Image: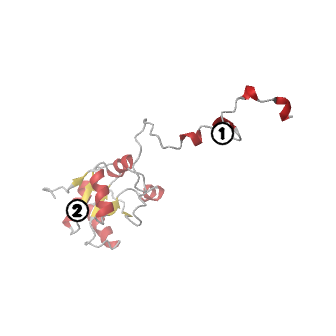
Amino acid sequence: AAGGGAEVVDVLQGKTLLDRHGYLFLDLREAKAYDHEHLTKPPRCSVNIPFQGDTEGLVAAAEGKKLGKSVPLLVACKDGEDGPSAAAALAAAGWSAVAVEGGYEGWRERFTTSGRAVIPKGRWVPSGKEALKSGLNVGDAAMSYEEKLNVEDVNWKDLK
């Protein structure tokens, strides 16, 4: 940790710490926001302690939640403003804690709550399933499309 402030990692580094190094995602957003949406993968990777700038209260709450000091913390506030000071307070109290650059909002710009990469907005990415959504598979349309059935060759009298 640098003088006074905690180490800040970018979202990709944070994801690696979460997935491969057993970090716990400490979400500092309000309980209502956390209940609405939070990280779900890896399972039980996320804990919520709402933080309003009171570092002593945060440390007490972390101790109250029995967050073991052997578990390193990835600290994320809403937007990256309060994370570093919160992480610094936790580090001073004995935890290994790093802050996430951009906070939860920054994280969600890159990853879904289940850890999948978010597709950049405004870009079309082929998934290989486009034909299924094209409407060609409605009724027998797909079959006649694939068989190159020519409507003009159909003898309409035979169909009556």
Q: Which residue is mark 2?
A: 89
> Which residue is rendered at x = 28% and y = 70% of the image?
71
Q: Relative to the observer, which residue lies in front, 136 or 73?
A: 136
Q: Which residue is mark 1?
A: 142
Residue 69 location (% of width, % of height): 25, 72
> Which residue is rendered at x = 35% and y = 71% of the image?
65
> Which residue is rendered at x = 77% and y = 30% of the image?
154
57 sits to left or right of 35: left
- Which quarter of the figure has residue 5? bottom left
Mark 2 is surrounded, within 10 Å at the Cα level, by few (under 14), some (14 to 19) or many (20 or more) other residues, namely many
For numbered disc 2, what is the local secondary structure? helix
For numbered disc 1, what is the local secondary structure? helix
Q: Relative to the observer, which residue lies in front, 82 or 141?
A: 141
Q: Relative to the observer, which residue lies in front, 82 or 27?
A: 27
- Which quarter of the figure has residue 155? top right
**Label total for image:** 2
Residue 34 location (% of width, % of height): 43, 58
Mark 1 is surrounded, within 10 Å at the Cα level, by few (under 14), some (14 to 19) or many (20 or more) other residues, namely some
How far apart are the alpha carbons under marks 1 and 2? 62 Å
